[in-house]
Image (cartoon, grey):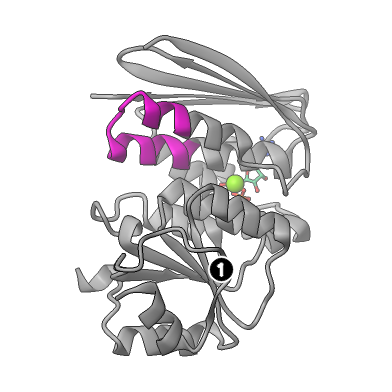
């Protein structure tokens, strides 16, 4: 699913300037607020999962961006309308990570994306 | 490839934590190390760097890269780990609220570092903790 389509599905916003070409497709997602959990569960994720994946989280600190960077996530989706600081957005942009935002809670936005065809680890 | 270097890690500096890991990750990427190995290295050294930030008075991260492996040594100046076996147990954590705000303190870091590494050695006293890990490229 393209970034534009995802933004439409979640009725959210793209918070970083465009990083990838418009036809870049995101296929997978992982949701969580504990960075160590993501780092553990995704250590052995199938190749390409994070590279075409979105990290969905209510954690809007520098360390959620760092975690996405270490795992090679293509995008991070910040839930509950939290607004990242400019420092956080710059860090993401410089690491090539797309930042999306939504007012929904994580549960709701996960449901919307799953219904639209985005897959999780256990679907592979 | 042959490279070595050192980073200083400040205690509780959660906005800059990850700088050492990020720099090493970029070096390995440029050197053409395989993606799955880089992921293991990145995860291990990132969790280790965060531990120095959130649990210690500060320390250093020294890396040694050669053709067959990377070795990374984290040294800090205390307060040390009282019971290493307990610290390695999943779920055990003494992290404070600030660390938790940044998404850490689940008590899974050390175990993940150990599982991601080919060689893992940790020693600790009240004067500090030394974590020495190696990951082979093949
Ligand atoms: N460098 C360190 N200095 C002092 N204590 C440490 C250090 N690294 C780990 N610890 C101790 O080991 C525990 C477990 O570490 P870890 O598994 O990484 O979980 P977490 O960082 O989420 O607490 C920590 O909560 C802390 O008590
Ligand atoms: Mg830890």
Q: Nearer the viewer, residue A113 or B10?
A: A113
Q: Which residue is mark 1?
A: A33
Q: Is residue A18 above or below residue B48?
A: below
Q: Quadrant of the C terminus of chain A?
A: bottom left
Residue at left offset 36%, top offset 82%: A5
The stretch drawn in magenta includes residue B11 = no
Please state if B36 lies on the left or on the right of B24 as rendered.
left
Q: Nearer the viewer, residue B131 or A29?
A: A29
Residue at left offset 58%, top offset 58%: A64
Residue B50 at x, y percent in the picture = 63, 42
Please state if A17 lies on the left or on the right of B60 as rendered.
left
Quarter of the image where one finds residue A7: bottom left
| Range of residues picked out in magenta | B26-44
Q: Main secondary structure of the magenta part?
A: helix
Q: Is residue B3 above or below residue B82?
A: above
Residue A9 at x, y percent in the picture = 40, 88
| Quadrant assignment for ligand 1 | top right
Give the chain of mark 1. A
The stretch drawn in magenta includes residue B28 = yes
Asked whether the viewer can see residue B92, the reply is no
Residue at left offset 77%, top offset 34%: B10
Answer yes or no: disc 1 within 8 Å of ligand 1: no
Q: Is residue B15 above or below residue B129?
A: below
> Judging from the image, what secondary structure is the residue with disc 1 in?
loop
Asked whether the viewer can see residue B18, the reply is yes
Q: Is residue A76 above or below residue B8?
A: below
């Amino acid at each position: 699913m393209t970034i534009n389509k995802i933004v439409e599905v979640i009725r959210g916003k793209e918070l970083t300037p465009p990083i990838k070409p418009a036809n870049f497709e995101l296929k997978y997602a992982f949701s969580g607020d504990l960075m160590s959990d993501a780092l553990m569960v995704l250590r052995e994720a199938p190749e390409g999962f994070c590279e075409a994946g979105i990290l969905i989280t209510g954690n809007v600190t520098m360390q959620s961006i760092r975690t996405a960077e270490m795992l090679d996530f293509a995008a991070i989706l910040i839930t509950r309308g939290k607004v990242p600081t400019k420092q956080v957005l710059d860090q993401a942009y410089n690491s090539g990570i797309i930042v999306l935002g939504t007012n929904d809670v994580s549960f709701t936005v996960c449901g919307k994306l799953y219904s639209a065809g985005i897959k999780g680890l256990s679907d592979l | 490839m042959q490279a070595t270097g050192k980073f200083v890690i400040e205690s509780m500096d959660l906005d800059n934590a990850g700088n050492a890991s990020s720099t090493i990750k970029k070096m390995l990427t440029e050197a053409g190390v395989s993606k799955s190995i880089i992921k293991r290295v990145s995860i291990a050294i990132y969790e280790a760097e965060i531990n120095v930030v959130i649990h210690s008075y500060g320390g250093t991260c020294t890396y040694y890269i050669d053709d067959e492996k990377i070795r990374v040594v984290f040294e800090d100046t205390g307060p040390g780990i009282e019971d290493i076996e307990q610290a390695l147990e999943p779920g055990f954590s003494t992290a404070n609220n600030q660390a938790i705000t940044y998404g850490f303190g689940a008590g899974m870091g050390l175990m993940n570092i150990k599982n991601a590494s080919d060689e893992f050695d940790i020693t600790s006293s009240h004067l500090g903790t030394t974590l020495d890990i190696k990951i082979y490229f093949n």
